[in-house]
Image (cartoon, rainbow, N blue to C red):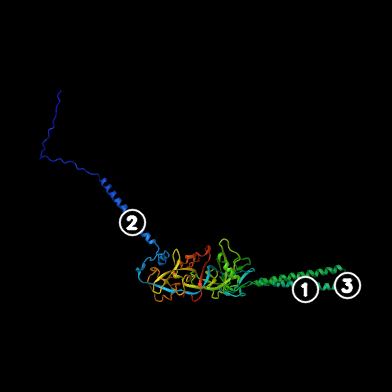
């Protein structure tokens, strides 16, 4: 068997023939996109992490409290935010003084009249005339209204006639009795006839007494047709107009009279203060009470404590007090809400500083004291009592100069310059530092001096605020 061997002979390439190019290799675009996307995704994550870190750092820095030198001193370290790089810091300062300050209990109160009378008609009839004007001050006994008196005048005359007739009958019976007594002594009539006549006289006497009672009742009803004021006070709005028929059973009445002078204020205090107040009352002391406006800045009226309720309300843990006010200028209006401040006792020879000078942190209360070299140092103090404008403190000597405004850039050792007039300036309403009373009031167990007395942390169960008032030259100007 022959095996045919086949040899491959290379072909001659014809240069003149057109070249046949190999097809280009086309890469899959999705592969390139995936690679690019993966790279970009990593950059996005990196940028996101950097942004989150920067944002967290910014939030941390903003949320940090602005510690003053006093806060730094509390931690036992020098320096603070701002440091001495601020240079000379302009501040307002004043001197601590020695004086007396009163310890007060304060709470929201309601003005309550001693007497409020709804005047009603006690008889039925037509309202003929009205003798008052709405809002008029009337005195006890003044004529207010007149009910048609004619039916009641006729009843009086009718009962007078009945009484006269029965009195005549009684007179005749008495004459007969005297005659029967004389005849009976002569044995001319039986004893029974005499006894009958005596009974007839007693019967006529009872009839006369009944007639007299009916006449008195008719006269009273006639008097009721003239309605007079039972108290001295202010008349409210008229409830019934002339010409209407009024009845004794009407519920609304004709008008309402409210006594305004004197007037009382009722407020509550926490049971923790009962011993202090009750002790003063038992000793016979007159405890002053001031009625202030809502902001506790303006005194409306001045009075004294009248009495204390006889029991504590177990649901609120408070006891009610009533204070009496002359109300000569009629500034206290019935059912008006005011702030009552009860003076319990006086704190004498205390070191007094403006409340605006008191600074606080989490550890303590302190003040910035100006040294003779015009630098400041923080001095820890203990707040005793405060009235919002003036505070009694311990740990500070009278005569020390304390800063009342310009604390933001202060720290221990800061150089300061006193503003013109600052040495005599006291922190108070409308002055620099006066607005800080609310934010300072709740710290260290001291009450806030804002209008709402419930903001104090020194008040048990949220009833009443205990604070004080300066009463001598040591008080804030």
Q: Position of residue 84 (x, y in %)?
A: 36, 68
Percent from the top left, x then y, of residue 165? 76, 72
Label 3 neighbour load within 10 Å: few <14, some 14-19, many 20+? few
Judged by depth in the image, the label closer to the viewer, 2 or 1, is: 2
Mark 2 neighbour density, 10 Å: few (under 14) some (14–19) many (20 or more) = few
Q: Quadrant of the N terminus?
A: top left
Q: CA distance from mark 1 to mark 3?
A: 27 Å
For marks 3 and 2, the one nearer the N-term is 2
Q: Position of residue 112 (x, y in %)?
A: 56, 69
Write down the residue under mark 2.
51
Q: Nearer the viewer, mark 1 or mark 3?
A: 3
Asked whether, in this view, residue 246 is left or right of residue 85, the answer is right
Mark 1 packing: few (<14 Cα in 10 Å), some, or many (20+)? few
Residue at mark 1: 168
- In depth, the one of 333 and 194 nearer the eye is 333
Q: Is residue 311 visible?
A: yes
For the residue pair 213 and 233, the one nearer the viewer reads as 233
Residue in front for this viewpoint, 371 or 471: 371
- In this rendering, position of residue 256 left or right of residue 211: left
Quarter residue 440 falls in: bottom left
Residue lying at the far front of the rendered structure: 76
Check contact, mark 1 vs mark 3: CB within 8 A.
no
Of pointers 1 and 3, the one earlier in the residue sequence: 1
Mark 3 sits on what residue? 185
Between disc 3 and disc 2, the foreground one is: 2
Inter-mark Cα distance, 3 to 2: 137 Å
Please, is residue 412 above or below residue 59 in the view? below
Q: Position of residue 173 (x, y in %)?
A: 81, 72
Q: Residue furthest top?
A: 1
């Amino acid at each position: 068997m022959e095996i045919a061997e086949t040899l491959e002979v290379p072909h001659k390439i014809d240069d003149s023939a057109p070249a046949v190019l190999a097809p280009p290799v086309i890469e899959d675009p999705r592969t390139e996109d995936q690679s690019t996307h993966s790279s970009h995704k990593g950059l996005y994550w990196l940028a996101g992490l950097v942004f989150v870190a920067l944002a967290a750092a910014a939030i941390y820095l903003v949320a940090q409290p602005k510690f003053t030198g006093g806060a730094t001193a509390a931690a036992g370290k020098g320096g603070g935010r701002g440091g001495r790089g601020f240079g000379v810091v302009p501040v307002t300062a004043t001197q601590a003084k020695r004086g007396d300050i009163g310890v007060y209990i304060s709470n929201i109160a309601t003005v309550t009249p001693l007497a409020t009378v709804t005047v009603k008609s006690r008889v039925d009839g037509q309202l003929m005339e009205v003798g008052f004007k709405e809002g008029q001050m009337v005195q006890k006994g003044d004529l207010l209204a007149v009910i048609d008196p004619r039916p009641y005048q006729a009843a009086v005359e009718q009962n007078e006639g009945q009484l006269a007739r029965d009195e005549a009958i009684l007179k005749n019976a008495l004459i007969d009795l005297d005659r029967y007594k004389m005849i009976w002594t002569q044995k001319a009539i039986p004893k029974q006839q005499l006894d009958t006549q005596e009974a007839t006289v007693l019967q006529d006497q009872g009839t006369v007494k009944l007639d007299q009672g009916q006449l008195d009742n008719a006269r009273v009803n006639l008097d009721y047709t003239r309605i007079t004021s039972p108290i001295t006070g202010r008349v409210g709005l008229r409830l019934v107009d002339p010409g209407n028929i009024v009845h004794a059973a009407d519920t609304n009445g004709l008008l309402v009279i409210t006594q305004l002078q004197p007037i009382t204020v009722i407020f509550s205090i926490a049971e923790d203060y009962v011993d202090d107040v009750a002790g003063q009352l038992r000793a016979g002391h007159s405890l002053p009470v001031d009625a202030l406006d809502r902001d506790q800045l303006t005194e409306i009226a001045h009075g004294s404590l009248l009495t204390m309720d006889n029991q504590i309300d177990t649901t609120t843990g408070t006891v009610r007090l009533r204070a009496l006010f002359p109300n000569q200028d009629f500034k206290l209006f019935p059912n008006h809400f005011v702030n009552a401040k009860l003076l319990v006792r006086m704190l004498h020879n205390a070191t007094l500083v403006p409340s605006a000078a008191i600074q606080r942190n989490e550890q303590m209360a302190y003040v910035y004291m100006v040294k003779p070299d015009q630098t400041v140092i923080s001095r820890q103090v203990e707040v005793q009592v405060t009235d919002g404008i003036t505070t009694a403190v311990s740990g500070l000597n009278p005569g020390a100069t304390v800063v009342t405004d310009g604390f933001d850039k202060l720290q221990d050792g800061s150089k300061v310059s006193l503003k013109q007039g600052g040495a005599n300036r006291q922190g108070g309403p409308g002055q620099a530092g006066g607005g800080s009373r609310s934010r300072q009031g709740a710290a260290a167990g001291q009450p806030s001096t804002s209008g709402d007395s419930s903001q104090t942390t020194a008040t048990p169960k949220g009833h009443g605020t205990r604070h004080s008032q300066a009463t001598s030259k040591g008080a804030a100007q």
